[in-house]
Image (cartoon, rainbow, N blue to C red):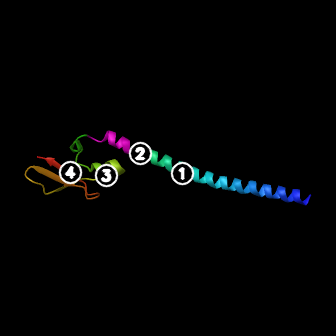
Amino acid sequence: MKELSDLLISCVKNIDSKDQALDKEEKQLNGRLEQIKKERAQLRERRNRAVNYPEDIRVTTFPICPRCYLKDGFSIKLTPIPGTAETDKSECRQCGYLLEEEV
């Protein structure tokens, strides 16, 4: 009878151990699922910004950095820098993006 009792106790402990391991794995998977949802939401936001970004950035009241706008939604004003007789140049002080436009 003692052997049966020990076997049952061992079986219950084994089941409990596996159940705890599954709980831990489930929590990890739920955490990953939340990460995926956040990443998808960020991708959708970036896509919307790309779709809605004006073809000619001069359409806005001032040129904005396309890199910062598309990546993070920031409207960072491009700062004019010395160009040449043929080109105007503007630079983003946030990310270093350089815009060169023919005059």
In x, y percent, where is residue 67?
Answer: 30, 50
The Cα atoms of the two marked residues, 4 and 2, are separated by: 25 Å
Nearer-N-terminus badge (4/2)? 2
**Would you name the residue on which mark 2 appears?**
43
Residue segment shown in magenta: 42-54
Q: Which mark is residue 99?
A: 4
The Cα atoms of the two marked residues, 3 and 2, are separated by: 14 Å
Residue pictured at 88% horizontal, 59% vertical: 3
Give the structural element (helix, strand or loop) at label 4: strand
In x, y percent, where is residue 12?
Answer: 79, 55
The Cα atoms of the two marked residues, 2 and 1, are separated by: 16 Å
Q: Nearer the viewer, mark 3 or mark 2?
A: 2
The Cα atoms of the two marked residues, 3 and 4, are separated by: 13 Å
Give the structural element (helix, strand or loop) at label 2: helix
- The amino acid beneath tag 4 is Leu
In this rendered view, identify the residue nearer to me: 60 or 28.
Answer: 28
Split into 4 quadrants, where in the image is the N terminus? bottom right
Work out which residue is located at the far front of the displayed protein and give it: 3
Q: Are marks 2 and 1 in contact (CB under 8 Å)?
A: no
Q: Which mark is residue 68?
A: 3
Residue pictured at 22% horizontal, 41% vertical: 56
Q: Which mark is residue 32?
A: 1
Q: Are marks 4 and 1 in contact (CB under 8 Å)?
A: no
Nearer-N-terminus badge (1/3)? 1
